[in-house]
Image (cartoon, rainbow, N blue to C red):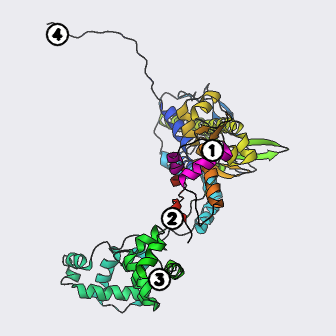
Amino acid sequence: MRLGLHQSARMEQRMVQSPQMIQAMQILQLSSQDLADRVEQELSENPFLEMIEPGQDAAGEVGSSDGGVQPAGTTAAPEAGSGLDIAPDGPGEDFERYEREWDPVRRTRDNGDGDRKLEAMANTPDAPKSVAEAVLDQLAFLDLDARGRAQAEYLVYSLDSRGYLEETLEEIAQECQAMPETAGTTVEELARVLQDLRSVIHPALGAQDLRECLLLQLESSGAETPLLRALIENHLEDITTNRLPRIAKATGRTLEEVKSAIESLRALDPAPGGEYGENTAAVITPDVAVDEQDGEFQVSLTRQRSTELRLSPTYKQLLRDNKKDRALAEFVKKRVENARWFIEAVLQRQSTLERIAVCLFQRQREFLERGVRGLKPLRMQEVADEVGVHISTVSRAVSGKYAQTPRGIFPLKYFFTGGTTKESGEVASQAAIKNRIAELVRQEDGANPLSDDQLAELLGKRDRIRIARRTVTKYRKALSIPSSSQRRVF
């Protein structure tokens, strides 16, 4: 065996992703709000990137492939080696001082955007309080000593998001022994503190389960009856599954009496802490707009301030004033290249998203004309082939994006769906079939609701759509439609 060093050559194909490619893919996948946040971050970090304000001269610069500059709004790809002349040698420069004092772009941006940011912050709703935070705010209304307050706080922090106690008072009392201020806590003490909390917050706060929650409210309201208590203690599952005749037989009451009692129970609150800790509704900002003009549909991207970017020309003046400063030139070169790459990635996102959206709504024109019934089965691969991109690019482009259409606002992913071939040879999309099932359920006789077998039969007779009963069941569950026995009206 011979030991030693040797050289060999071989050919192989590998896909190597450059930092620019990775950045472009990341930006393509961002939603409108996430892109706006990313732009704000880049603006704060790069002094040579600026936003074009309304009415401002847009004669800025973005990176060009030959290392020069070109007007903002073009899409030429930048290169890493942009042509910035670097002097041989020179003294260092305090770049932090430059960014803080010299840069007029940042000063202008900070002054111009400051009022808008402050106004936006002032108009942003407060984050919703958790159950614990909301209850703690009410402790001031209770006459508690230091020990009682500590016990109350421990109880409060033991509540779950519904306002229930997942542990028993015995378990909580045991845990309180580990803290000096609550050492020696008894179950009776915790019960008294919990009752005080219920008196100012909610009569069912700290219930162990739904039965106790409803019973506590029933007792505090003074509206308790033997039938209501029996329903809560013995028949909650029967109510959930709509087995009203079974309840009537077990309680010896008429069906009307049972229905009336159930309506009374509906007025009770199943989650004492439900009003707290809820997430605020997300604001949807459509990326794509589809408008009808003279019978034709126009697809365009919604105008976004986050995409109005340009390369600040101030770097040229900075280099001219510091020709012999090599360190400054290196700093400027790096920041200018980063700005060019970012602008190009944002512009590429616009171009890719627009081409995909145009192709998508050309294929789904019947949806725009007829609504959900006109939705056609469509795969991402079909759009990718037509646009000339990889399927992963389509997936990234539509992820988290919405379109504003004459039929409403929909996520772009909504328009990619499978389908079933009808007897006529046409193909009905899954969304159209689900919509038809929902229509049939809305039109059914409540006293004799349609079973899944009957729904499948009606789809075959009326719509010439042949699907199995188990497929109807799957679609019905996806629509959160209860079974026929649960939909029956007595």
Q: Amino acid under label 4? A: Leu
Mark toward the viewer: 3 or 4: 3
Q: Which mark is residue 460?
A: 1
The reply to whether dot 4 and dot 2 touch (C-beta < 8 Å) is no
Residue 177 placement (x, y as % from top left)? 19, 78
Q: Residue furthest top?
A: 2
Q: Amino acid under label 2? A: Gln
**Residue tagged by mark 3?**
253
Image label count: 4
**Residue tagged by mark 4?**
3
Q: SS for tag 4?
A: loop
Residue 227 placement (x, y as % from top left)? 44, 85
**Residue tagged by mark 2?**
486
Q: Residues within 10 Å of mark 2 (few under 14, many from 20)?
A: some
Classify residue 163 as left or right of residue 348.
Answer: left
Res. 310 image quadrant: top right
Q: Is residue 44 visible?
A: no
Q: Which mark is residue 401?
A: none
Classify residue 405 as left or right of residue 260.
Answer: right
